[in-house]
Amino acid sequence: MQDLRSFFDPTHFIETKENDTYQALQWGANVQRVTQQHFDWEDADIVIVGCGEWRGEKDNAYHSDGPDAIREQLYKLYNWHPSVKVADAGNIHRGASVEDTYAALREVLIELHKAGKVVIVLGGAHDLTLQQYEAFRRNSQMINAAVADMLIDLDELEIVTSRSFLMKMLTSQPNFVGHFSHIGFQSYYAHPRMLETLDKLRFDFFRLGKVREHMEDMEPVLRTSNLFSFDISAVKYGDAPVNINGSPNGFTGEEACMLARYAGMSNILTSFGIYGFDPARDTNNMSAQLLAQMIWYFIDGYQVRRSEAKLSERDEFISFHVSFTDNDTVFLKSKRTNRWWMKLPNQMFVPCSYNDYLVASKDEIPERWLREQERLL
């Protein structure tokens, strides 16, 4: 793995703190950093990368210290999973142009992906999600991607911005997005034709109200995702006062943490980005605390993924045989994590939720079953 230090600011956040700032069990005393003399990438399971680039939202935007504001809160939290090794690479150095910053972040993410690391990106504007995707695309890897945002950033613009990046991500050729899920959009901000287009592409989009009714239904969505991008605008203003251009509606702080934990639990998810946080807009550091807690829950979920059994280990699962509308199938429930899978007619098992099992038990077809069947055609 190449030496990546030239892509980062020379001074790390932790180096601005006194040696006795953190207690032995707080994250600030346990996170490795790239600037350490004997740092070894091989020792890290999860790598944190900061990138305060905002020019994708506004041309003359300043470089934000948002990643460090999140670290300020994250490092105070207690480490309940010492077996999970977390490294903090620091902040990507601001480029002369936004394209230069993109290139630096992209190179770092590509190298970390090749090394098999799980990466948490602290943004910056939401268009940085494209560089998460590039780490997979440059490796010609087909992926499932998920985005949580109150908006669907599919504006048709000639340049890539925080409002148009999804257009390039979903339509550029060659394309390596096998499936896309949008979580928590707010209908009154979404053009109906845009949703029709996503539906024709067999992509999934989940309205805020529906998601909040059954949050656990998002766990299978994130379990099948390789990439998760979270815009803090998905959280309601009351729980994230940084959202001065956000909405009075949205996820609660607890629900945002649930989504982060679900993402951490996914055995295939290796890229988690958090965007839209500008500390200049924050009130009493409440939003920074929320994002730090989301990262804590992501790490907590990562610990769960390591404990899950393989589907081939059938003694570790409870089987439920169900018949619905002339379909005979099997649902599996993990004894270790209580997660669910259902068997499709092609004999494949796909992640599902307990609600899917309940629907099938009532002799009805689970919507997830139908969507999976449609995508197989």
Image: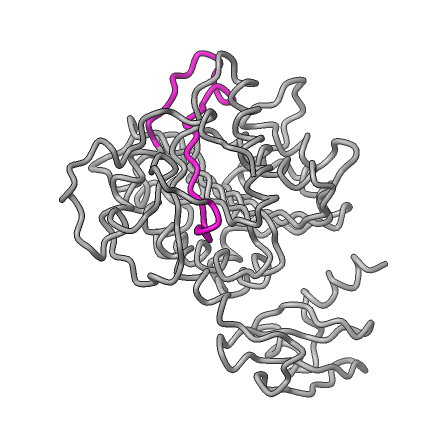
Which residue sits at x=68%, y=75%? 342
* Left or right, 199 with reference to 268: right
Which residue sits at x=62%, y=69%? 352
Magenta segment: does it hold 45?
yes
Q: Tell me where the magenta segment starts and ends, as one range.
A: 41-66
Quadrant assignment, res 334: bottom right
* Left or right, 16 with reference to 85: left
Is 310 located above or below residue 32 in the figure? below
| Main secondary structure along the magenta-highlighted residues | loop
Residue 5 coordinates in the image, percent (x, y)? 44, 29
Q: Looking at the picture, tell me which residue is in the foreground, 31 or 289.
A: 31
Quadrant assignment, res 278: top left
Tell me how many marks there are.
Answer: 0
* Left or right, 271 with reference to 158: left
Is 60 located above or below residue 346 in the figure? above
Q: Tell me the quadrant of the picture where the C terminus can be found.
A: bottom right
Q: Tell me the quadrant of the picture where the N terminus can be found.
A: top right
Which residue sits at x=79%, y=64%? 373
Which residue sits at x=28%, y=26%? 280
Residue 98 coordinates in the image, percent (x, y)? 52, 18
